[in-house]
Amino acid sequence: MSVELPIYLDNHATTRVDPRVVDAMLPFYSEDYGNAASKSHAFGWRAEAAVEIARETLANAIGAGSPREVVFTSGATESNNLALKGVAEMRRNRGDHLVTVATEHASVLDPCRYLESRGFRLTVLPVDRDGLVDPEAVRQALSDATILVSVMAANNEIGVLQPLEAIGAICREREVLFHTDAVQALGKVPVDVDGWQVDLLSVSAHKLYGPKGVGALYVRRRRPRLRLVPLLHGGGHERGLRSGTLPVPSIVGFGRALALCEAERAAEARRLQGLRERLRERLQGELAGVRLLGHATRRLPGNLNVAFEGVDADALIVALHDVAVSSGSACTSATPEPSHVVAALGLERGAERGSVRFGLGRFNTQEEIDYAASRVIEEVRKLRGAAPS
Ligand SMILES: *Cc1c(COP(=O)(O)O)cnc(C)c1O
C-alpha cells in the first residue's frame, strides 16, 4: 500500500478546505457576488440570505439562543481580541481584574498582557501536570474587581479539554463574564454555550475544513446582555460590533464546513481517536521513553503530543521531512524555546527537549498513520543512536 507524500499531520495549525466547502463557496465569487449590506437589489439580498443561513448554522452548533448572538470576524485572533478588549473597555468602571490560564493561545495571552500594560490587573492561572486548570483555583482568583475569566475549551498543542462547565458555574455565581476560545473544540467535540455558561466564545473556520480569514464571536444577548466596545468602527456591520464588508464566500464556506463537521462529528471522533490510539500504541510499544503530554483521555480525538526522551524535538521534526508535524503552535514555532504550553506542565524529565504534536484530521487514512509511525520510530532510533554518550 503506497501513500502520497508528504503526509499532513498538522491539523491543529490549519486544515485542508473540504472540496464540498469549496463547491459551496464558488457561486458567491462569480454569480451571487453582492454586498450583503446592499438592501436595494437582489444581489445584496441573496448575499445576505446566504450569510444568515451560515449564522444560523453556527448558532445552532454552539447552542446559542439566537443567530443575532453570532458576530462574524476575520478569524479567532480577532474574536479573542474583540472579546477581551471589548469587555475590558465595557466594564472598565466596574473592575480592573482579568483571569486567564498559562496554556492559552497567544491571541488570548497577548491581548491580556496588552490590557495589563494599560492598567488592568491580570492573574494567569497554572495548570496541573495533565494540562488542566483547577476550577477551585479560578474561584480563588476571583475578587470584586474581576470582570472577565478566559479559559480555552480545547488546547491547540496538547489537546486537553478544560472543565468549562465547572468554571462557568463559578463565574455565573459571581457574576463575572466568562469567555472561551473554542477554536479547537468546535466541530470536534460538543460545544454548548448554555451548558458551559459562557458569555463569549471564539471560533475560526480554517480549523474545521473551512477557509482561512473568517471566524466568529458569540456574544450573549440575554442574561446578561453584553454591549461590547468594538475594535473596528465604520459602517456598523454586525450590529455595530464589527464594521467592514462581510466576506460572503468565506462565511458561506464557514457555514458549510461546520454543518459537515456536525453531521459527521460522532463517527469522525471515533475514527480519529482510533487512529490516534493506533499511533500512540505503536510509538510507545516500539520505542522506550515516549512520554504522552496532556491528559490521556480528556483530550481532542485527533491530538497526540509526545516527548521522546533524549531526542531534540526540532531535530526530529526536520528529519521527518515527509511527515508534516510541529513542535507547538505554528504561530510561535520560529522561536527555539520550548512552547509555553509544554513549559506550563512543569515536567522535570522527558520533555525538556520539546515534544512533537501530531494533529490528525479528516483526510488522514490508516495507511498514512502506519507510515508516519514507522518513520517516527526510524528517525528516533537514528537520533538516539547518533547522540553522544
Ligand atoms: C488557530 C487558533 C487561534 C487563531 O485563529 P485564527 O483564526 O487563525 O486567527 C486561536 N486559538 C486557538 C486555540 C487556535 O488553535
Image: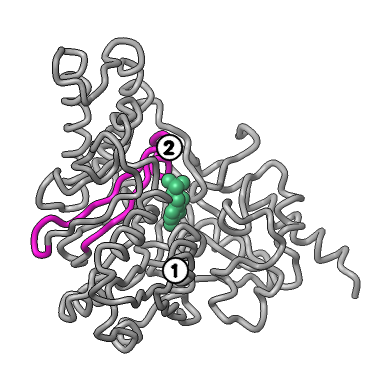
Q: Position of residue 184 (x, y in %)?
A: 39, 54
Determine the residue positioned at 74% across, 54% down: 378
Determine the residue positioned at 44% across, 62% down: 111
Determine the residue positioned at 31% across, 18% down: 28
Q: Is residue 352 above or below residue 79?
A: below
Q: Position of residue 41 (x, y in %)?
A: 15, 12
Residue 149 in magenta stretch: no
Front-most of residues 255 and 80: 80
Highlighted range, magenta: 199-224
Which disc, if any, is residue 224? none
Which disc, if any, is residue 213? 2
Front-most of residues 81 and 323: 81
Q: Position of residue 258 (x, y in %)?
A: 29, 40
Determine the secondary structure under disc 2: loop
* Left/right of residue 313 with respect to residue 331 in the rendered view: right
Q: Which residue is mark 1?
A: 118
Q: In the displayed orientation, state which residue is furthest to the bottom.
A: 140
